[in-house]
Image: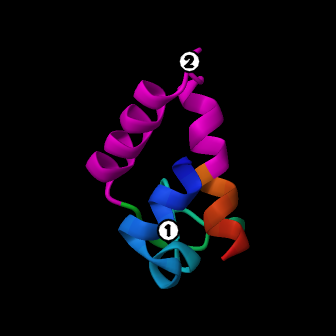
Amino acid sequence: MALDLATLVFGKDTLSRSTLTGKGKNSEVKEQLDAETVGTIIDHNGERHIPWPEVSEIRNLLLCKCNNE
């Protein structure tokens, strides 16, 4: 659900050129996803799923989504 929400909120183009931290591979600088929006996606996803998923697990999924776009 977090991945679908991220695609709806940010769009595939933004995800493809961004990371969660603004740092890419080999010290490459990339656009950083808005931290507040990422936090909202994480919170929303946690509220919908029981048991509450680990924040690190959701962040890793979002990181993979950025890399795969």
Q: Earlier in the sequence, mark 1 or mark 2?
A: 1
Task: Report the predominant secondary structure element of the magenta stretch.
Answer: helix
Tell me if I can see residue 22 in this picture. Answer: no
Residue sitting at x 54%, y 26%: 49
- Name the mark nearer the viewer: 1 or 2: 2
Work out whether residue 65 or residue 47 is closer to the camera in this orientation and state it: 47
Instruction: Tell me the residue that label 1 is attached to.
Output: 7
Residue sitting at x 72%, y 71%: 68
Q: Is residue 18 left or right of residue 53?
A: left
* Res 10 quadrant in image: bottom left
Residues drawn in magenta: 34-61
Q: CA distance from mark 1 to mark 2?
A: 22 Å
Work out whether residue 23 or residue 56 is closer to the camera in this orientation and state it: 56
Q: Is residue 44 left or right of residue 29?
A: left
Residue 4: where, in percent of width, then height?
54, 60
Q: Secondary structure at mark 1?
A: helix
Which colour scheme appears in the figure?
rainbow
Amino acid type assigned to the residue bearing label 2 in the image: Ile
Please, is residue 16 above or below residue 25 in the view? below
Residue sitting at x 46%, y 57%: 5
Amino acid type assigned to the residue bearing label 1 in the image: Thr
Please, is residue 59 above or below residue 5 in the view? above
Residue sitting at x 42%, y 68%: 8
Q: Is residue 56 left or right of residue 42?
A: right
Residue 34: where, in percent of width, then height?
32, 58
The label number, if any, that marks residue 50 in the structure image: 2
The label number, if any, that marks residue 31 in the structure image: none
